[in-house]
Image: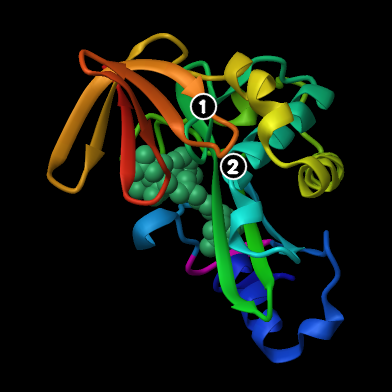
């Protein structure tokens, strides 16, 4: 679509209006998003022509529990797709970001539009910077874009198709087997593997060493009192 407020909102409204028309893997891309969102209602900045913004529909017949680890799985799928277009060293930052050379390249926003019967209907939103020059845009944290590494340029359609295909593949496997079999792959891409991290949960703060994730996608942090597990939601992770 040329202009949408948010591709996530668009799929969400289709889920509520006419769910029967949606099949797993259906995706909507927007040239322009007027109200792109990140987690906690934060803004996602996407200059016209300089970014890829899309959302995909996927359903989980067994409900919420079978979505455990989904945002991490999506990170793995995006990194694999990026590899196919020549970006070898993208990394994941728990729970929902993609980094390149220590800077944020892309974000993932997963939303569930209610559970209808047993089935959880879910929207997977991806925003990726293609050409968002660091000296022209301040997004509130260090960011980067594909134009900085792919000097020959980026074919946006090819990129979109490659990422979507990668998502299809990984989501199929994930639906059958869960996140467990992807744990080692995720950990090999982890930006903070074995590094000190600080987690902020409301006004509580924890620090420890990132020791990877479990099969539910929870982050394992080694502290003086042993290993603590953190689930997505309200937790923010920072390097130290
Ligand atoms: P947290 O660890 O709390 O999730 P986060 O940085 O992942 O932190 P999100 O809410 O997931 O926060 O993402 C929204 C944030 O992404 C915004 O607050 C902004 O700092 C950043 N952001 C917005 N647009 C872009 C962009 N085009 N590229 C990189 N980062 C962006
Ligand atoms: C984040 O880092 O918090 C996630 C940002 C996700 C942005 C994408 S852009 C396409 C989709 N539509 C939205 O409104 N948000 C996601």
Instruction: Tell me residue 156's x, y (percent).
Output: 78, 43
Q: Is residue 176 above or below residue 2?
A: above
Q: Percent position (x, y) of residue 170? A: 80, 40
Asked whether 33 falls inside the magenta stretch, the response is: yes
- First of labels 2, 1 by sequence position: 2
78 left or right of 104? Answer: right
Residue 165 magenta-highlighted: no
Q: Which residues are magenta?
A: 31-35
Which residue, given by chain and number where applicable, does mark 2 sit on? 69
The picture quadrant where one finds residue 153 is: top right
**Magenta residues, dominant SS class:** loop
Q: Residue 236: image x %, image y %?
A: 32, 39
Circle 1 is placed at which residue position?
A: 213
Q: Residue at x 73, y 28 (%)?
A: 181
**Mark 1 lies within 8 Å of ligand 1 (Cβ measured):** no
> Whereabouts is ligand 1, in terms of quadrant?
top left
The reply to whether callout 2 and callout 1 are in contact (CB within 8 Å) is: yes
Residue occupying the point 38% across, 32% down = 229
Horizontally, residue 187 falls left or right of residue 218, namely right
**Residue 125 visible in the snapshot:** no
Few, some or many residues within 10 Å of mark 2 (<14, 14–19, 20+)? many
Give residue 55's position: percent from left, percent from top.
68, 60
The residue carrying pointer 1 sits among few (fewer than 14), some (14 to 19) or many (20 or more) residues within 10 Å by Cα, namely many
């Amino acid at each position: 679509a040329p202009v949408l407020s948010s591709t996530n909102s668009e799929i969400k409204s289709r889920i509520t209006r006419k769910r029967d028309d949606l099949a797993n893997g259906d995706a909507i891309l927007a040239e322009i998003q007027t109200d792109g969102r990140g987690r906690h209602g934060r803004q996602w900045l996407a200059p016209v022509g300089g970014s890829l913004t899309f959302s995909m529909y996927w359903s989980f017949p067994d409900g919420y529990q079978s979505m455990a680890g989904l945002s991490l799985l999506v990170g793995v799928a995006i990194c694999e797709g990026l590899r196919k277009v020549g970006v070898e060293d993208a990394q994941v930052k728990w729970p929902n970001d993609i980094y390149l050379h220590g800077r944020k390249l892309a974000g993932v926003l997963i939303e569930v539009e209610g559970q209808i019967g047993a089935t959880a209907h879910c929207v997977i939103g991806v925003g990726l910077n293609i050409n968002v020059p660091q000296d022209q845009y301040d997004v509130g944290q260090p960011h980067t874009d594909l134009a900085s590494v792919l000097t020959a340029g980026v074919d946006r359609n090819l990129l979109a198709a490659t990422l979507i295909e990668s998502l299809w593949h990984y989501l199929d496997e994930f639906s059958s087997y869960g996140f467990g079999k992807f744990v080692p792959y995720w950990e090999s891409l982890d930006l903070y593997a074995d590094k000190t991290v600080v987690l902020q949960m409301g006004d509580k703060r924890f620090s420890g060493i990132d020791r990877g994730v479990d099969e539910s996608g929870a982050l394992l942090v080694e502290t003086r009192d042993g290993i603590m597990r953190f689930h997505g939601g309200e937790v923010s992770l920072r390097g130290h």
